[in-house]
Amino acid sequence: MWQSLSYGANYKAAYCLSVCPAGEEVIAPFLHDRPGFLREFVKPLQAKVETIYVQPHSDAEEYVARRFPHKRSKRVGSVLRPNSVASFASSVVHVFQPGRSRGLEATYHFCFTGEETLDCTIRISKGKITMTPGLVGVCDLIVRADSKAWVRFLRKEIGVPRLLLTRKLRLRGNPRLLVAFGRCFS
């Protein structure tokens, strides 16, 4: 808040801040007259004709088209580009697209080796994703990859066939599950 007062608005959540009655000092109007609050603050923002920035083929792109047909969608590139397997593991739950995971029920063990070592279990079930550190339970697909090569793959600098040929990526289980995993992200 102080940064915004000193240098102007520097946050990307102006709508959230204007319609979210979080905090003791601003929640009273919301609690007192919820329909009035929604009418005064939320509805005008929903009705506003504007551009909404979305990633291509994401759930957000589909939602804006369906829920706000009067708003224009503009596609933007990926905003989260992992630079480590740790950032991949921690961001995977945030970039997951539930709508693109329909019908997928799978558990993945990711084992990263090389410069950066990390083991994690990722479960996709009923449109939800969980990431657990370590290798937990029985999996449907084991993905063993060189950490540096995996990051290059995520950044679209190298493809899966080359990783497989150079043995920087090894799979145990149905390889189609890796394709299905990839479809769950824009």
Image: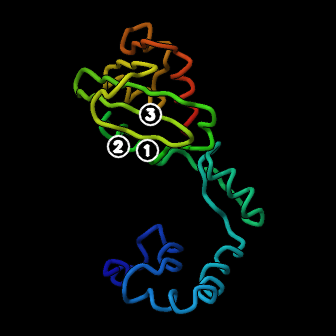
- In the image, taking residue 180 as reference, residue 27 lies left or right, namely left
Q: Secondary structure at mark 2?
A: helix
The front one of 101 and 47 is: 101
For disc 2, the neighbor class at 10 Å (few under 14, some 14 to 19, many from 20) is: some
Q: Secondary structure at mark 3?
A: strand
Eye-nearest disc, 2 or 3? 3
Q: CA distance from mark 2 to mark 3?
A: 14 Å
Q: In this rendering, is residue 82 above or below 139?
A: below
Q: Secondary structure at mark 1?
A: helix
Q: Quadrant of the C terminus?
A: top right
**Where is residue 131 drawn, in percent x and y?**
37, 38
**Where is residue 89 drawn, in percent x and y?**
35, 38
Give the mark nearer the N terminus: 2 vs 3. Answer: 2
Q: Quadrant of the N terminus?
A: bottom left
Q: CA distance from mark 3 to mark 1?
A: 10 Å
Residue at 44% over, 27% down: 107
Numbered label attached to residue 123: 3
Residue at 62% over, 32% down: 103
User: What's under tag 1, amino acid-wise?
Assistant: Val
Residue at 38% over, 22% down: 138
- In the image, taking residue 176 as reference, residue 62 lies left or right, namely right
Judged from this view, the residue extending furthest toward the right is: 69
Residue at 46% over, 20% down: 140
In the rendered image, which quarter is residue 23 located in?
Answer: bottom left
Q: Are the two marked residues, 2 and 1, in contact with CB atoms closer than 8 angstroms?
A: yes
Numbered label attached to residue 90: 2
Q: How many numbered discs sit on the rendered protein? A: 3
User: What's under tag 3, amino acid-wise?
Assistant: Arg
For disc 1, the neighbor class at 10 Å (few under 14, some 14 to 19, many from 20) is: some
**Where is residue 37 drawn, in percent x and y?**
59, 87
User: Where is mark 1, residue-wise?
Assistant: 93
